[in-house]
Amino acid sequence: MTKLQAKNIVKHFDHNGNSVVALDGITLNVEEGDFVCIVGPSGCGKSTFLNIIAGLEQPDSGEILLNGKPISETGPDRTMVFQEGALFPWLKVIDNVEFGLKMAGIPKDERREISRRYLDMMQLTKFADSYTYQLSTGMKQRVAIARALAMDPEILLMDEPFAALDSQTRDLLLVELQLIWERTKKTIIFVTHNISESVILGNKVEIFKNRPSKIKKEIIIDYRRPRLTEDANLQKYYHEILQELKSEVMARSKDDLK
């Protein structure tokens, strides 16, 4: 069943008085329960596209359909996890996780039960009464993911959430996120500049061309889970994506030199 459709999404930006095309007709179908990773050169519009899906930005033309219905603003059916967790440092971990539930008017006992369930899923139960400023960067991202999942969105949007993490923490979270995806059956759209992340996480990888962006190729990854970074059998997917990206990265470098 098709969960989300992006139909011919076009987006322009103003740059020094000139109109620059960021997205030039992005069309994408995301099925129920898909884990879709989007990769492409830096600055090609990956995050802009994710923001349009979230309703944080509007396209100049084209439309986003969720369950067959057009969407044009933010809503609880789509929750975003950013590169920086955007947590409230003056609140305890559990209060951060249940913040959205509180704003939605969920009774205290119910939202506390929901929050504790996702804290347990993210292995944060013993830190529930800690303040977020006391946590490592990796643990903060766990809190951000728990908060997003607690809202039970139809689609979880993730914008390079592991980019600031050290490699050891990132590898652990890559495994945990796969387990969470299999457990919750969530539809996830995950933006990354890291090819290995896309191979490990995605059942589909969408490769964006250099700006103005189009989808250059979709690669299906049908491989057992959980996937590990050291699994040599994943290298064929890595190299396939790398080959598609090489020309786009070179084109971007030439543009930067102009």
Image (cartoon, rainbow, N blue to C red):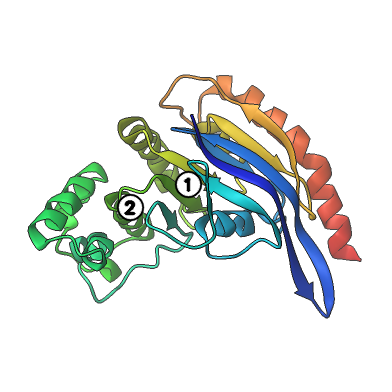
Residue 124 x, y percent position in the rendering = 22, 51
Q: Nearer the viewer, residue 148 or 164?
A: 148
Please identify the quadrant where the C terminus is shown.
Answer: bottom right
Identify the element where label 2 is drawn.
helix
Query: In which quarter of the view is residue 38 placed?
Result: top right
Q: Earlier in the sequence, mark 1 or mark 2?
A: 2
* Residue at 46% in and 41% down: 188
Q: Residue at x 74, y 69 (%)?
A: 13
Percent x, y of residue 254: 88, 57
Classify mark 1: helix, strand or loop.
helix
Residue at image mark 2: 142
Is 64 situated left or right of 144 in this image? right
Q: Give the residue type at disc 2.
A: Arg
Residue 90 place in picture, x, y as percent: 25, 76
Query: Taking 171 as reference, is 143 left or right?
Result: left
Q: Does 45 sit left or right of 123 as displayed? A: right
Res. 191 in view: no
Q: Which disc number belongs to residue 38?
A: none
The picture quadrant where one finds residue 48 is: bottom right
Residue labelled with disc 1: 167
